[in-house]
Amino acid sequence: MTNALHLAPPLTRGLLDNYATPDFFCELMNRKSPAPPIIDCVKKRLSALQIQELQNRTASAEAQLYRMGITFTVYTDREAIDRILPFDAIPRIITAEEWQHIERGVQQRIQAINLFLHDIYHEQHILKDGVVPAELVLQNANYCQAMVGLDVPGGVYVHINGTDLIRDQQGRFLVLEDNARTPSGVSYVIENRHMMLRLMPDLASGLPIRSVEEYGPRLHNALCEVAPEGVDDPQVVLLSPGIYNSAYFEHVFLSREMGVPLVEGRDLFVENHKVFMRTVMGPRPVHSIYRRLNDEFLDPLAFNPDSLLGVPGLVEAYRRGNVTLANALGTGVADDKAVYAYMPRIIRYYLGEDPILESVETHICAEPEGLAYTLANLDKLVVKPVGESGGYGLLIGPQATQAELDDFSRKLRHNPGNYISQPTIGLSVTPTLCGDTVEARHVDLRPFAVTGRSVWVLPGGLSRVALRKGSLVVNSSQGGGSKDTWVMAS
């Protein structure tokens, strides 16, 4: 008789069995009691899954993302230029009531931003009334003289906007910053949804999840609505810097979603102050341009003469009302991190309303009291350069070494006007797959809004997750990932 070695079957663990809810607002686990029924339903479904199963599905998702070319470019990394945005298959849930609050707040904010931009390029009432310091606007690097006195169709300057939101330890949604120039990331919102429905149909089955498929048609319709007057069938194009741009995948994706040509500067030309596209059938008029180039590269005759990316004469054609640019020139003033501090006052000034979405308390280091407060509390604050994005150049005081604090203090004293500071907010967390376990990771949310004759907000948004333990920086360029955002219908 031979001795048989009987191996016990491997132990299986439910997805949330060992999840440790931290001392932050966890959007799945520690909402107010009783939790919304939809949250309890998702928790039960997740609990029935096993870690190994989720790992396999996640690996499959990332392989598919890479094969499909859904990547972004990291210019500072010489070893890995093209990367996929790491995808976490545990969705983020936003209830119908929460979304209604976000939607109303974003619409209000964009309405105020457009009124602010019209004013600063026309009568400048808000500057004359001292609500916003004139030098903060008129000396801003993003203030565009070509826009002074120019009326834009429908008064819309910001046609595409991304509003970055966070949740604090009480679960309140707060605006962290505005993105009113060329906000990116909406392609991940839509592709994440496609991926989730393929990988996790059992989790999504029967849930009233709002669709994200409308974005392309909505964007195209808005760009047609703001085309020059008298054009019955506007030609819309998406203007890209080209294949080496970090968001080139998104440019391809959005041109396909809208059903419009993807062009580069060399594909367009200006004749008699009108814009044309080169085609195999000859020149074709262009009426609305969704541009993914920064202002300074758009027209070598108006801005940087060395730019090979833009279209000579484009700005003059724009000023004469023969083409619409989305977003308009000079919108960077509105999403400047110093101007951000005045947004609650801007909303009250133009709309006579309190902000629906609150802002994070902000100290402007260009002002003596703001600089003094920041220097005295540097180890407790997040300090940001006003002109940077992507998480570059900032200081997170509580996580900094003394040497880093000393170095940043010198930078602040040398150039205080380049910085603002904010308190360190305990960003909300959601369960996230981390290796062979599920742990809490910090998240933010970027809802995307499209404005033509009205403001429409895509039901969902880009949920970015800080994959490094304890990190508050969610940007993809700093190692962050993304989740699918499920907005529930009422």
Image (cartoon, grey):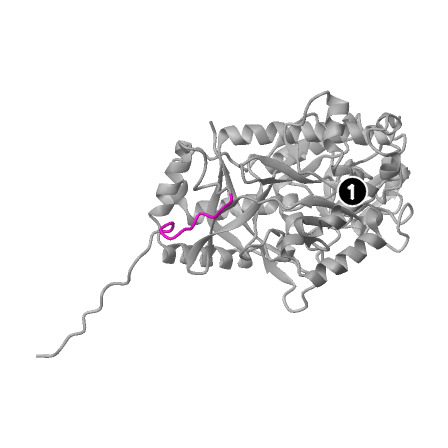
**Would you place residue 364 above or below residue 14 in this image?**
above
Name the spot of residue 404 as percent of width and height, x first. 71, 61
Find the residue positioned furthest to the top.
352
Question: How many numbered marks, from 0 up?
Answer: 1
Q: Is residue 328 visible?
A: yes
Q: Main secondary structure of the magenta part?
A: loop
306 with respect to 66 (left or right): right
Name the spot of residue 94 as percent of width and height, x first. 50, 36
* SS of the residue under disc 1: helix
Name the spot of residue 325 as percent of width and height, x first. 78, 38
Identify which residue, 55 or 350, lies in the foreground.
Answer: 350
118 with respect to 6 (left or right): right
| Residue at image point 91% right, 47% down | 301
**Mark 1 nearby-residue class (10 Å; few <14, some 14–19, many ≥20):** some
| Residue at image point 75% right, 28% down | 345
Asked if residue 14 lies in the magenta stretch, the reply is no
461 with respect to 27 (left or right): right
As shown in the figure, which amino acid type bears the numbered disc 1? Gly
Q: For mark 1, what is the residue?
A: 370
Asked if residue 19 lies in the magenta stretch, the reply is yes
Find the residue positioned furthest to the bottom.
1
Q: Quadrant of the N terminus?
A: bottom left
Find the residue positioned furthest to the front.
376
Name the spot of residue 438 as percent of width and height, x first. 43, 54
Q: Is residue 225 visible?
A: no
**Would you place residue 245 above or below residue 144 in this image?**
below
Identify which residue, 254 or 161, lies in the foreground.
Answer: 161
Question: Where on the picture, by quarter, is residue 234?
Answer: top right
What are the residue bounds of the magenta stretch? 15-24
